[in-house]
Image (tube, rainbow, N blue to C red):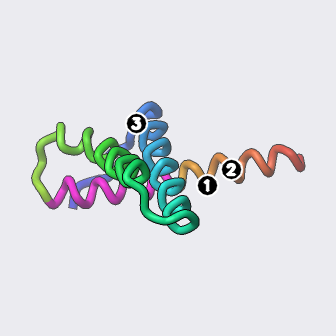
Amino acid sequence: MKKKVERSKGLRVFNSLCAALLMTSVIYILVMGFNSIVMAVMVISVAGAAAPLIHSDEGILEIVIGTFEAMIDGVVAVIEGIVNTITSLFS
């Protein structure tokens, strides 16, 4: 297994933006139902997270696993930002 590569801050911000778009789309679908615009936003967010991995040209499996890893990293970054904001209010 390869050693984990640290992502740059810009890429982490981009991944968190893609993850936030994906989470917002999923919540919208659960509340309001399917819509073509929401489906397009979901596809764009996943494609955006996968674009840097596709550019690295390492293989299909690495692209799929890296996309899930990037989305999870983005979700963690969003949650981390929310928790930091809440803790800064009480400290």
Q: Residue 24 location in percent, x, y?
A: 53, 54
Residue 65 is inside the magenta segment: yes
Which span is picked out in magenta? 61-75
What residue type is disc 1 on? Answer: Ile
Disc ID at residue 11: 3
State the residue lying farthest toward the top: 10
Residue lying at 23% horizontally and 44% vertically, measured from the top left: 53
Residue 66 is inside the magenta segment: yes
Asked if one can make out residue 70 in the rendered structure from this viewpoint, the answer is no
What residue type is disc 3 on? Answer: Leu
Residue named by callout 2: 82
What residue type is disc 2 on? Answer: Ile
Within-10-Å neighbours for mark 1: few <14, some 14–19, many 20+: some
Q: Secondary structure at mark 2?
A: helix
Residue lying at 15% horizontally and 60% vertically, measured from the top left: 61
Callout count: 3
Quick one: label 1 or label 3, which is nearer the N terminus?
A: 3
In the image, is residue 38 above or below residue 13? below
Residue 51's quadrant in the figure?
top left
Residue lying at 18% horizontally and 37% vertically, measured from the top left: 55
Report how far apart the C-alphas of labels 2 and 1 lie in the structure: 5 Å
Residue named by callout 1: 79
Q: Secondary structure at mark 3?
A: helix
Q: Is residue 37 left or right of residue 29?
A: left
Report how far apart the C-alphas of labels 3 and 2 lie in the structure: 19 Å
What's the magenta bit mostly, secondary-structure-wise?
helix
Residue 85's quadrant in the figure?
top right
Residue lying at 53% horizontally and 68% vertically, measured from the top left: 30
